[in-house]
Amino acid sequence: MNKVIGIPSDGPELLDPISEHFGHCNYFVGVEIDQSENLKIAFSLRNNGHTGCMEPVNDMRDRRVTHMIVGGIGGRPFTGFTQYGIKLYKGVTGTLNDNVQLLLQGKLQPLNEAACAGGGH
């Protein structure tokens, strides 16, 4: 079974930087990884705002995301992902590709609690 990694991003491509906060990103990008660890963009959704914290969480679930890499995330979406069984990892400054490679190498830390990256959250 392929993994789909969801990542809040500043742009829609693998070489764009990860966003520092889940709900305030420009895009939600899904990266599909096959058994040979080949990467491809599964989706790039423009974040045009949302009416509630669970809306983007439900979007990720509906797109069969299995793992999320986030720079920061609030309590409600953290709880939502946990309830849906979507594994959360703390992203690092860098590109989406950098973060996916670190996840595949086992070098990203699991996120066990909400962690906002700044911006008054």
Image (tube, helix red, strand yellow):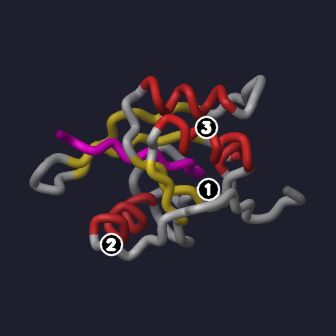
Q: Nearer the viewer, residue 115 or 47?
A: 115
Label 3: few (<14), some or many (≥20) within 10 Å?
Answer: some
Residue indicated by mark 1: 19
Q: CA distance from mark 3 to mark 1?
A: 19 Å
Residue type at tag 3 = Gly
| Placement of 107 over or under 81, stated as above or below | below
Residue extent of the magenta highlight: 1-10
Residue type at tag 2 = Gly
Residue indicated by mark 2: 106
Residue 14, by quadrant, is bottom left
Give the percent coordinates (x, y) of residue 42: 33, 35
Looking at the image, the residue that sits furthest to the front is 83
Counting residues from the start of the chain, the first of labels 1 and 2 encountered is: 1
Q: CA distance from mark 1 to mark 2?
A: 21 Å
Residue indicated by mark 3: 80
Residue type at tag 1 = Ser
Counting residues from the start of the chain, the first of labels 3 and 2 encountered is: 3
Give the percent coordinates (x, y) of residue 94: 51, 70
| Placement of 5 over or under 55, stated as above or below | below
Task: Pick the quarter of the image with the N terminus.
Answer: top left
Q: Is residue 88 magenta?
A: no
Give the percent coordinates (x, y) of residue 73: 68, 53
Label 2: few (<14), some or many (≥20) within 10 Å?
Answer: few
Q: Secondary structure at mark 3?
A: helix
Tell me the residue at 50%/54% (across/down): 88
| Placement of 115 over or under 41, stated as above or below | below
Q: Main secondary structure of the magenta part?
A: strand
Tell me the residue at 44%/58% (across/down): 96
